[in-house]
Amino acid sequence: MFPTLQTHQDFHAHVYFDNNTLDQSIALRNTISVELGFFVGRLNQRLVGPHPAWSFQVSFTAAELDNFVVWIEQRRQGLSVLLHAVTGDDLIDHTAYVHWLGTPLVLDLSDFE
């Protein structure tokens, strides 16, 4: 499904939310953890790193990428989701190796430059 991304081993998804979608995001985060068994990071109700909105992170592998994209697309209910490769180069990971589900947000890449 994502041939340019699948050349990488590991991935993150960042699910973005705000106060109006907090309950929805908590439920989605819990469902990802229980149903998929993926590592899910903390629910950040503040800006973290390059992320311009509240978010939580999901970690998964290339083997799980296609299935996760289909799964999250069916359940994100309007939330924006950033998918990116994890290569060790944060700037490239958050620019060249990205795919958005929903409305793309503008990341603050200043810490990576």
Image: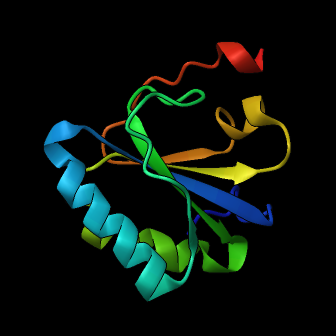
Can residue 78 be seen here? The reply is no
Identified at 20% across, 59% down, the residue is 24
Identified at 67% across, 59% down, the residue is 11
Instruction: Tell me: 54 left or right of 83.
Output: left
Residue 93, horizontal then vertical, whole percent: 72, 40
Q: Picture quarter containing residue 58?
A: bottom right
Up-down: is 96 above or below 87? above
Residue 87, horizontal then vertical, whole percent: 83, 49
Instruction: Identify the colour scheme used.
Output: rainbow
Instruction: Tell me: 77 left or right of 106.
Output: left
- Number of marks in picture: 0
Instruction: Tell me: 59 left or right of 43.
Output: right
Using the image as rendered, state which of residue 19 and residue 2 is in the foreground: 19
Please identify the quadrant where the C terminus is shown. Answer: top right
Up-down: is 84 above or below 64? above
Residue 69, horizontal then vertical, whole percent: 46, 68
